[in-house]
Image (cartoon, rainbow, N blue to C red):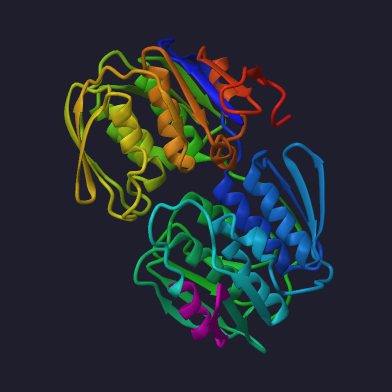
Amino acid sequence: MELLRIRGGPRLEGSVAISGSKNASLPVMAAALLTDQEVELGNVPDIEDISTMASMLEHVGVRVEHPHTNTWRLHAAELRTTEVDPNLSRRMRGSFLLLGALVARAGEASIAKPGGDDIGMRRVEQHLEGLRLMGAEVEEREGGYVARARRLHGARIALDMPTVTGTENLMMAAVLAEGITVISNAAREPHVYDLARCLIGMGAHITGVGTELIVIEGSGGLLHGTTHNITADYIEAGTYMIAAAATYGDVVVEHMRPSDLRWLFSKLRSAGCDIVEGANHVRVTCSHLRGVDMTTWPHPGFATDMQPQFCALMTQATGPSVISEALYENRFRHVEFLQQMGANIAIDGRSAVINGPARLHGTRMSIPDIRSGAALVIAGLCAEGTTELDRVFHLERGYDDLETKLAGLGADIERLVTDEPGTEVRDLTGVVGD
């Protein structure tokens, strides 16, 4: 069993470089299906979900090469199947991104219902209805979906909510369709923009990305290959910013896009932090924290993927704060663990009412999902004593070399392994994940 052991207390100081975005890499990898030429991707994070997506692409016939740590080459000259391996696709929600690309490229696709973190209902009806409007026949079968289309055509698609993966799926389908597709109420997250940037580099004609109205002029045929560098992971950047604030630290977060995180800057400043922006970095310093309220919302609102980390931060703030989750009904899985550590948190419907500052104490816990795991790491950095976290694989799905980066900022953190419960623990820091 692998563990993260954190001894709380040290103030984070120094600089940390941000990796490429997981949420941008997955759709861009899927986009390699839209051409029979090679697509080379750089700045790809070295995390588990990327390897899973690569395995799914290999299963359908894509030639996959991984010449360097953060570089992947994908070549979909021919496809041998349009059925995505269900054992792989159930591991993460990002697998569903293959649906639109496969239908557009091969005329059919079969994919299991997507897996991923259990944070609540994440509907796919908008993906399916959008494909139907573009001329596909889509049916639900036991455990999955099958879609077929002789030729997709342009359509006007009005999303009832700005779903990120839905927007990305429909964009990929539309670039090979005949005619013009208009997606209204489209998602505006930075990774949607990065997918569009890659597709345009492959020859697609797309306008309006970053607004609620995206217009795609379909090519009616395959795109060409490209070389594309993945954008920085703004969720990773925000996680380190919050960790710096929670430990009353002084940290420069480098290799990021400050414009992606203005909503977080606003809340951190309201909480008492000093935020100084550069062209591709941000410095976070903090000497006092006060409670502030926050509600998650689609971009450019406060990202739901940052809500657990912000909850952990507010346990260290003076006064009350109310954290409301507008997007997912099961996104407070971290709260019971923070309570075990001594946090004063009450759940009221889809809000968490926090009274701080709390004197947290270390304990042993199991990570329930990626972002809850990040929240527990932040809490462990603030706690008295030692915190041990198992089910570390959740963090590996979303964070590239988390413990090494935190250790570089002065955190007392190490990765350990034990073969059986209760046996002596060996230090694997610097070995696991190499």
Seen in the picture, residue 262 relative to 89 is either above or below; the reply is above
Seen in the picture, residue 197 relative to 126 is either above or below; the reply is above
Is residue 423 visible to the viewer in this orientation of the structure? yes
Relative to residue 155, is residue 27 drawn left or right? right
Q: Nearer the viewer, residue 430 or 227?
A: 430
Residue 47, image x, y percentages: 64, 40
Q: Which residues are magenta?
A: 126-144
Residue drawn at (72%, 74%) of the image = 82
Q: Quadrant of residue 149?
A: bottom right
Residue 147, image x, y percentages: 60, 81
The quarter in which the C terminus is drawn is top right
Q: Quadrant of residue 224?
A: bottom right
Relative to residue 313, is residue 251 drawn left or right? right
Residue 289 lies in magenta, yes or no?
Answer: no
Relative to residue 4, is residue 387 drawn left or right? left
Residue drawn at (62%, 71%) of the image = 111
The quarter in which the N terminus is drawn is top right
Residue drawn at (52%, 12%) of the image = 410
